[in-house]
Structure formats: C-alpha cells, structure tokens
Amino acid sequence: MRNLILICALLISACAPQATQSRPPASPVSYITSTPSLTFTPNVIVINDTPVPTSTPLIYTVKSGDTISKLAEQFNISQDKLRAANPDVSPNSMIIGSTLLIPDNSAVPAGAFTPTPVPAPVTQTICHPSAEGGLWCFALIKNNTDELIENVSAQITLLDENNTSLAGQTAFAPLDIIPPRSSLPVYVYFDSRLPAKYSIQVQVLTANLIPIRNARYLPAAIQKSIAQINGRTAQLSGQILLPAESSDAIQVRVAAVAYDKNGIVVGIKRWEGAAIPAGGSISFSFFVSSLGAEIDAVEFFVEAKP
C-alpha cells in the first residue's frame, strides 16, 4: 500500500517548468536543506487521549532465519500487508538487527514491542480530492526536539457530522526519520466517496526518539537544490553529498514536500538513488505535483543509510 501511495500521490506530469530557483539556503543543517519560510495554518484537529480503535503497529527486530513469509505467518497477517508496511525492505535480504513495522498486533511474539510515541504534535491536517472521487489526506508531524524521530505513523480517521467514523487508515511518512526541528507529513489515500462535510481525526501511533548521531543514518546533506515551479508542478534537482569521514551509503532517499502560498501541504514525492561512497556525491532530478493549489515552495529532506 505504501508504495502505491508514494507512486500515485503526486500525479506526475511532463510539464515544461519555468526556471525559478528555490529560496537561498540558510546555514547548513545535517539531514535537511534550507527550510522555506512558511506560515502554517493548522486545520481543526481532534486528537483523542486514547488511541483510535485500530490495530497498533509493532516494531520487530529481524533475527537470523527470518523471512517475510515466516513473519507473516508468525504475526497472522498477509505477506502483501507486511511488504506494504515495509516497502524499502528486500524480502530476500533482510538485515539482522534491522527493524520492521508490523501493522497488526493480533499476535505479539517475542522480539516485538509496542513503543510509546514521543510527543510529536500534529500542526496541520488537510485532505485533497482526487479525480477518481477519493481523498488524499495529510497530517503534518512536527519534531520539536534536537534529536531524530524515527518510524512515524498515525491513524487518520474521517468523521461525519455526528462524529461517526466514515473511514480510517494508518498513514506513514515518506522517510524513516523526521530531522530535528523539522516537519514531515504522513499521508494516506481513501478511495471511497465521502460526504461533503467531514472532520479529520489524527492519532500518532508510533514515533521513536533516537540520537542524531546514530549508526543507522549517515550525515548526508543536500546542496544546490533547485525547484523550477510551473503552477501545480515543480521540477526538482540538486546534489547529495556524503562527508569523507562517513561510512559508505547503501540506501539514499530524498523527500520533497510541496506547499501552497498559505503554507498548506499540497504534494509529496520520494526519490531513491544509488549508493554513495564516503566523500562522494550524486545528483537527483524528479518532479512533484500539487493535489491542490499552485505550488509556492518546496522543502527537501535527505536520508542515507549504511
């Protein structure tokens, strides 16, 4: 499901963008490029003190001999559901000691735990209608700490005028981490036709605080980032640099979040690149499209793993 969301969310179109350079960078910050100066206008958000009735994701540490099929049987879920919750995990080469998100807690074997989410405020919720009659819904999650927040997920529920649940799904962020003092949206697609009036309820399910100096993530940085904006589409490019004192990066990803002039999230896209040796760099180029109003600014994030 998560791969489908990431592929479909932004409805990429082959436009000929005007050459409009992104805003000048501020002082360099690890894991993230310069942040556009945006004024967020939060929607009304209903956050319960108790979780929304749903399956709570679990974090499982991969052990020797584990396979997708064995874990699916162990947790009593389908292999497709397990892969959808972990789209970046290769079913044939899972790394011992890495973690998997288990989207159903119907069984809790040894090695899994249900983490208590760290405080991660939801600063904005918005849903954009799709051409098919469904809704793309975003919840912007803020990391107010000086550390990394990892494995963020949230339950997004749509309620009618009587506060009766119309639909609900678990939403995920485009990257495994939210950098310090930054915001990333979690998002999900509802394919059913819904009434004109509804409210959005968000419950953060998982958000783990980890040190910024963490062996699982490398200090990659984006430089020379450019967003060529043409209305509701933007062509993005830049370079990813890895310090010489770092380890080699095996997995590299860039997430781009598009905002309208009011600071509302209107689109998101994730790009995946090749490995980078320590001290090396690679270039990236991809499109992001708006599901709502015209794009006014684009924020870049990078994540690199050894």
Image (cartoon, rainbow, N blue to C red):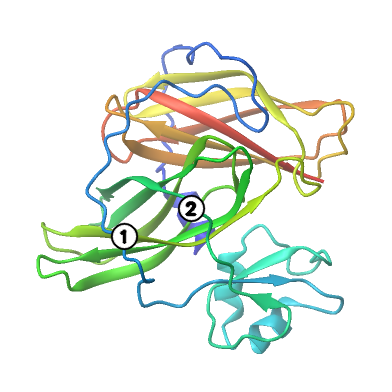
What's the distance in space between the residues labelled 2 and 1, CA to CA?
Answer: 12 Å
Q: Which sits in the foreground, 65 or 283? A: 65
Question: Residue 18's image quarter?
Answer: top left
Q: Along the horizontal axis of the image, is 68 left or right of 75? A: right
Q: Give the mark nearest the N terminus, 2 or 1.
A: 1
Does 305 appear above or below 153?
A: above
- The residue that appears at 85% across and 79% down in the rendered structure is 65
**Label 2: how many Cα within 10 Å (few below 14, some 14–19, many 20+):** some
Instruction: Classify mark 1: residues with Cα within 10 Å, few (<14), some (14-19) or many (20+).
Output: some
Rendering coords of residue 26 (x, y %): 56, 14
| Whole-percent x, y for residue 114 in the image | 58, 73
Q: Along the line of sight, which residue is nearer the eye, 236 or 214?
A: 214
Q: Which residue is mark 1?
A: 47
The answer to whether residue 34 is left or right of residue 20 is right
User: What amino acid type is highlighted by mark number 1?
Assistant: Ile
Q: Nearer the viewer, residue 159 or 237?
A: 159
Say whether marks 2 and 1 touch (CB < 8 Å): no
